[in-house]
Amino acid sequence: MALSTPTQTLSFNKLHASGNDFILIEDFDLSVALDKATISHLCQRRTGVGADGLILIQPSKVADFKMVYFNSDGSVAPFCGNGLRCVVFFLTSDNQAKISIETGAGIHWGCREKEGVHISLPKPECCYLNQNFAILGQAFTAHKVIVGVPHIVCFVEDLETFDVTYYGASLHHLDSNINFAEMGDNGEVHLRTFERGVNDETLACGSGGGAAAFVANQIYGQEPKRGVVFRHGERALYCASLEHLSMEGTASFVYKGVLSC
């Protein structure tokens, strides 16, 4: 779509966590004004910067920083796990003390550690487990958990060949991120996610990994740390219980640039 004449020039940084990529913009003076159409345009992969989401880093009155997250369609979301991983990576250095980040789903902490970035996630809210239904001739057993944002988790056979986009789009009416998972022989969860607000499969979903780890612990037995392997191929570690949820994984700086919008 055509956009109006650019009215502002902004510096940005591109980061990713497990292939889940984001445009980060420092907005410490609260001067950045981006409407939904502009954010969607910037996140387009062929005509914009290209990203699964856009993040504004702002000052906070209740934490060290505030994170405002937008999906790639320009809609606001209260939380993004991998987005938080990237924000913590961007704002901290190795062995620095934990920092606190205000989000739409509460205040969360994060720090860099030797193996990557360690962050807290919203405490899981279990809506239901083991709800059976069928769609397009495919039977599913669904589990719904809110980890800042709503997630449906369905365990399937042969995740590698499973048509995530077809069935994820078919379950769009549930207004949730749709996660398809398969248990590995070593107790790890292999995960593919059709993300709400992106309307496509992404290479990883941090909060979706938390939902899947939580469900796996409820169904298959509690593990102190549950590994989750994303479509990207990276493995993240989750501590997931009714009272606590955190994750450890890497984040990477890609590049920085300047855009007019």
Image (tube, grey):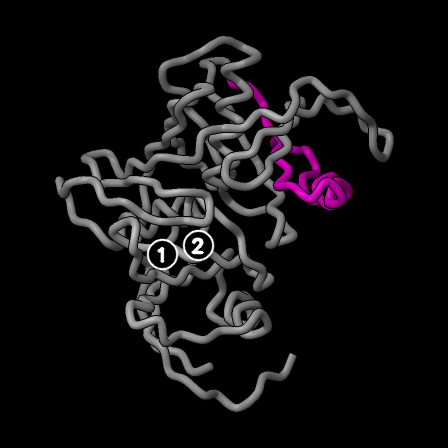
Read off the magenta span. 159-184
Residue 135 lies in quadrant: top right
Instruction: Say which residue appears at 57% left-offset and 68% top-offset.
Output: 40
Left or right of 74 on screen, residue 116: left
Residue in view at x 65 percent, y 19 percent: 129
Q: Are marks 2 and 1 in contact (CB under 8 Å)?
A: yes
Q: Position of residue 120 (x, y in %)?
A: 35, 35
Quarter-wise, where is residue 220 in the image?
top right
Figure quadrant of the N terminus: bottom right
Q: Residue furthest front?
A: 61
Which element is circle 2 on? strand
In the picture of the structure, the residue carrying the numbered disc 1 is 15
User: Nearest the camera: 91 or 1?
Assistant: 91
Is residue 237 part of the magenta span, yes or no? no
Left or right: 249 as drawn, with respect to 80: left
Among all residues in the image, which is located at the extreme right? 137
**Tag count:** 2
Q: How would you rate the neighbour count of disc 1 (Cα within 10 Å): few for under 14, some for 14-19, many for 20 or more?
A: many
Residue 21 numbered tag: 2
C-alpha separation, residue under disc 2 versus residue under disc 1: 6 Å
Under mark 2, the amino acid is Asp
Percent coordinates x, y for residue 239 in the rendering? 38, 23
Secondary structure under tag 1 reads strand
First of labels 2, 1 by sequence position? 1
Three-letter code, disc 1: Leu
